[in-house]
Image (cartoon, helix red, strand yellow):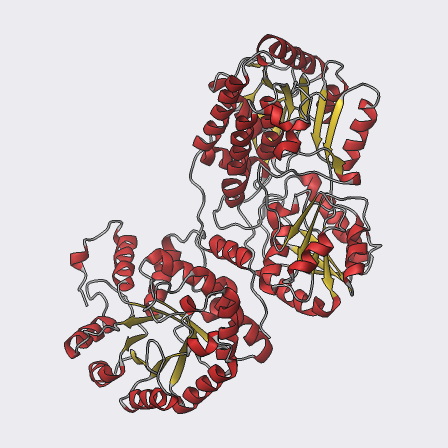
Amino acid sequence: MSVTVDAVMLETRAGSLAKRSIKTTTKVAGIRLAIQCMDLTTLEGKDSEGRVRSLCAKALHPAPHLPDVPSVAAVCIYPNLVPVAKEALRGTSVKVASVATAFPSGLSSMEVRLADTLSAIAAGADEIDMVIDRGAFLAGHYREVYDEIVAVKSACGPVHLKVILETGELGSYDAVRRASDLALEAGADFIKTSTGKVGTNATFPVAVTMCEAIRDYARRTGRRVGLKVAGGVRTTKQAMTYLVIMKETLGESWLTPDLFRIGASSLLDDLLMQYEKELTGHYASRDYFPMD
Amino acid sequence: MAIFEYAPAPETTKAAIREQYGLFIDGKWTAPRTGQYFDTVNPATEEPLARIAYAGEEDVERAVRAARKAYDKYWRKMRPADRAKYIYRIARAITERSRELAVLETMDGGKPIKESRDFDVPLSAAHFFYYAGWADKLEWAMRAGEEPKPIGVAGQIVPWNFPLLMAAWKLAPALACGNTIVLKPAETTPLTALALAQIAAEVDLPPGVLNVVTGDGGTGAALVGHEDVDKIAFTGSTEVGKAIQRSTAGTGKRLTLELGGKAAHIVFADAPMNQAIEGVVNGIYFNQGHVCCAGSRLLVEESAHEEIVVRLTDRIQTLRLGNPLDKNTDVGAINSKMQLDKIKELVGSGVDEGATLVQQSCVLPERGYFFPASFFTNVQQSHRIAREEIFGPVLSILTFRTPEEAVEKANNTPYGLSAGIWTDKGSKNMYIAQYLRAGVVWCNTFNQFDPSSPFGGYRESGFGREGGVHGLREYLAH
């Protein structure tokens, strides 16, 4: 039985965290952190090998003309493009994350979802972003969801598993909390908000709820699980607020790529623009940053 | 080494503070007949901010006379819709100057800028807007057959914890009903009341409708004792409230008192626990606990006691204590040296009586009056810290086993201003709420205020209501 969530107070709390004033040195540190914790993502039907190579180059060197900009944590792509990314990122620190389990809906047979996972791993994926079966969850078949995560986790072996709850489809914060608890108990290495494919993606209150679940679980078991926010994170201000939420709910020790990720595509450009502004005092045009 | 430590983020809006303030009487700034001035101090730096006129009996007399004249000459005769226009103007002026007023409030009183910016100032404006709308609709506040008539001259004495807001709560309904006012702000926090006087002058409020006399308890006593004052509205300590009631007894003066509290904040084991902790934190550490309706007695279901203590212990470590003008500060400065001493004395008594003290570990600023966010476990109902109002960031945690025991313990206090309940079960919330003897009961939330909602106490927390239609009736003859 999960602890319940009060929506009004949760949204008040998230709103007050979003009002933290992040300036000067903190902003620079936060931007670097957000880049280091980024899963630079492309998940479109039109993705091609060329597009993925270009993404990988940017993941490694986001802005060659700026000093000290770190590489992102990983690229996040569809399974059949994993070999291309592996090749492009060979010998670097940037990981290759692949979505799997019939992303984004998850509505295939368990065999197909497992096979999807195994083929991504065979192609060299370092991390797997799976989706849960929201239909089963909303129908109250919690055991089924739990077993599904356990099965995928076991298929992953040492490969890092992120479990996407698709919170925008769960309908309430209570459900977000319950799904978080299920994934934590089932052995997820990360819990992740969204696929980026539905109307509502990551939100501040949802992130607070998931952080609380992670914190309560860590307090009880000692195991530290990560959070990945994804979908709709486009601005530096949003990214800073997610860092604030992590820091003030889970503590600074969670602010590492091992325990925090932001899944995003266009966010990186805004971070770089703000970074340059902090260093030079003025904004540069978008044309000064390489598109991916 | 912290990797994401918040850099200082001070509010940069400048507030104009004069070196010296006179009294605001009959629409003009005048020197006090006493010839005396006192300093108002920034409690976060211990630096004096301005010299403030000390109003004695003769000054109070001048102010009351000005108020009486304005009452007879302008205000009681003015068309209600025109009265409303002035009140709307004040509301708009507060909104326009919100940043400046927030900075002033924070510098003079020590509260975090995020609170003065997001709570005190907007809510003050909201009260003026709300009551401006009532000015020409007063018959709807009356019972059948009653005519709305103002009372006359109101003496209003406000405390130092929410100086602007408490002034707004009192001024707005009094003005809307057609009364004129002598306002006496607290000794340690006069600046926003004086800014309000300036606003009154700038919006052309007729002279004498609002007068502001600064001073100490002696000034307040002169106002309370003045025979031409028709109504006294006081917010402050129960001790002073009792003295006021004694002195007004038999004089025919109308009286409302909003006094102390020792609110029960009840948390059941089935509460939405993460949010309940946020509610508890808001209930006691908001405005450093300088809140008459603070949830200062936490009653927790015994089966959840350990969990709540662990959660709260962790949570208070993340509170940011320091410069009240920093936008990221959660806990600001204690309002005065005197209040800090009182908090220390009561906390000492808690330790002596055998309760266990838990505090946030942080370095207090070298200058200024600060006290860390604190709570006590192992508190017994008989301990002073469970009975007396501490008026600081100090929570006492007690336990209960059944809903009945929760109600009994919650009501076992001479006060009755507010209470809070946390449970995920709606029926239990409603059931418990009806047995709590408190003027306001918050269910799964705390410190929610709205101009349309009445606020006030039971028993030693006072009588009379502020806010809503109930607040109007306190300023109408009936």
Residue B314, position in %: x, y? 60, 65
Determine which quarter of the picture holds residue B465. top right
Horizontal arrangement in the rendering, residue B162 relative to residue A35 (left or right): right
Residue B464, position in %: x, y? 72, 33
Q: Could you tell me which residue is drawn at 75 percent across and 39 percent down?
A: B461
Q: Could you tell me which residue is drawn at 61 percent across and 34 percent down?
A: B468
Horizontal arrangement in the rendering, residue B141 relative to residue B10 (left or right): right
> What is the number of callouts on the image?
0
Q: Quadrant of the C terminus of chain B?
A: top right
In the image shown, does B158 or B369 lie closer to the viewer? B158
Residue A43, position in %: x, y? 26, 73
Residue B254, position in %: x, y? 75, 23
Up-down relation of residue B241 to residue A11 (above or below): above
In the image shown, does A260 or A90 lie closer to the viewer? A260
Up-down relation of residue A69 to residue B363 (above or below): below
Residue A171 is at least partly visible in this image: yes
Residue B361 is at least partly visible in this image: no
Up-down relation of residue B418 to residue A253 (above or below): above
Determine which quarter of the picture holds residue A192. bottom left
Horizontal arrangement in the rendering, residue B267 relative to residue A128 (left or right): right
In the image shown, does B103 or A134 lie closer to the viewer? A134
Up-down relation of residue A122 to residue B46 (above or below): below
Horizontal arrangement in the rendering, residue A15 relative to residue B29 (left or right): left
Q: Could you tell me which residue is drawn at 74 percent across and 26 percent down?
A: B255
Q: Could you tell me which residue is drawn at 63 percent across and 32 percent down?
A: B469
